[in-house]
Image (cartoon, rainbow, N blue to C red):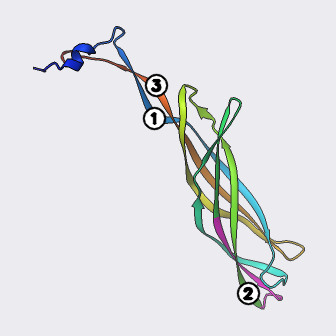
């Protein structure tokens, strides 16, 4: 047996329609995108590279994403940094060296799946779904090193939205 308080007397459990409107935070849009970057590097001492012996990616970091709006479109600006390590041969293959280079990236990911019933956008989140990987590494005609990288990012837009909830009395629930 339930006890009725003064508040419940002023606000009955059932609304006329049998539903209540609740305002809550929810994921209101999302998208994922894969990016490909091409970068050229000069060797450490200015010598001409002959061969790429290996590559590695470390130190991947994303900064806080920012919401971009324009007209009826919405997107999320993501940027970050990772470090490329490139081991190469030079001097006719008689010497080797390691090149370490920070790679900065910035992209705007348009939100493709977007629920337009948002009261206000409150936040954005970004997650790396494919860490940066070397797709190709080659020595150019000028003796520089050209490396192609690829990475994937998933973003979500969080906003305040309304949901309808059916109101059921405890007696109706069972």
Q: Nearer the viewer, residue 110 or 149?
A: 110
Q: Describe residue 66's horizontal placement relative to residue 43 as left or right.
A: left
User: Which badge, 1 or 2, comes first in the chain's sequence?
Assistant: 1
User: Which badge, 3 or 2, comes first in the chain's sequence?
Assistant: 2
Q: Nearer the viewer, residue 105 or 12?
A: 12
Q: Nearer the viewer, residue 119 or 128?
A: 119
Q: Residue at image x 59%, y 56%?
A: 63
Q: Quadrant of the C terminus?
A: top left
Q: Secondary structure at mark 3?
A: strand
Name the mark nearer the viewer: 1 or 2. Answer: 1
Q: Which residues are magenta?
A: 82-94
Q: Residue at image x 28%, y 15%?
A: 11
User: Which badge, 1 or 3, comes first in the chain's sequence?
Assistant: 1
Label 2 belongs to which residue? 96
Whole-number angstrom distance, CA of label 1 to CA of label 2: 55 Å
Residue 42 figure quarter: bottom right
Please check the rendered image and state whether residue 83 is part of the magenta-colored stretch, yes or no.
yes
* Whether residue 21 is situated above or below residue 65 in the rendered picture: above
Whole-number angstrom distance, CA of label 1 to CA of label 3: 9 Å
Name the mark nearer the viewer: 3 or 2. Answer: 3
Residue 48, image x and y in percent?
A: 85, 82
Dot label at residue 152:
none
Q: Describe residue 161's horizontal placement relative to residue 111 as left or right.
A: left
Label 1 belongs to which residue? 25
Q: Residue at image x 73%, y 87%?
A: 96
Q: Secondary structure at mark 2?
A: strand
What is the magenta segment's predominant secondary structure?
Answer: strand
Can you name the residue that lies furthest to the left here?
A: 1
Label 3 belongs to which residue? 162
Q: Describe residue 168's horizontal placement relative to residue 106 as left or right.
A: left
Residue 18 figure quarter: top left
Q: In this rendering, does residue 129 appear at all? A: yes
């Amino acid at each position: 047996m339930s006890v009725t308080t003064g508040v419940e007397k002023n606000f009955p459990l059932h609304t006329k329609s049998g539903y209540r409107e609740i305002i809550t935070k929810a994921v209101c849009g999302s998208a994922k995108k894969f990016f490909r970057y091409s970068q050229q590097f000069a060797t450490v001492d200015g010598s001409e590279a002959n061969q790429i012996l290996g590559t590695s990616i470390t130190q991947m970091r994303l900064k806080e994403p920012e919401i971009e709006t324009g007209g009826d479109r919405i997107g999320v600006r993501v940027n970050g940094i990772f470090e490329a390590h490139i081991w190469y041969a030079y001097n006719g293959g008689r010497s080797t060296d390691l090149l370490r280079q920070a790679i900065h990236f910035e992209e705007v990911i348009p939100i493709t799946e977007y629920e337009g019933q948002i009261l206000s956008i409150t936040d954005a989140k970004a997650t790396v779904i494919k860490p940066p990987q070397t797709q190709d590494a080659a020595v150019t005609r000028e003796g520089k090193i050209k490396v192609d990288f690829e990475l994937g990012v998933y973003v979500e837009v969080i906003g305040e939205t309304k949901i309808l909830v059916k109101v059921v009395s405890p007696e109706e629930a069972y």
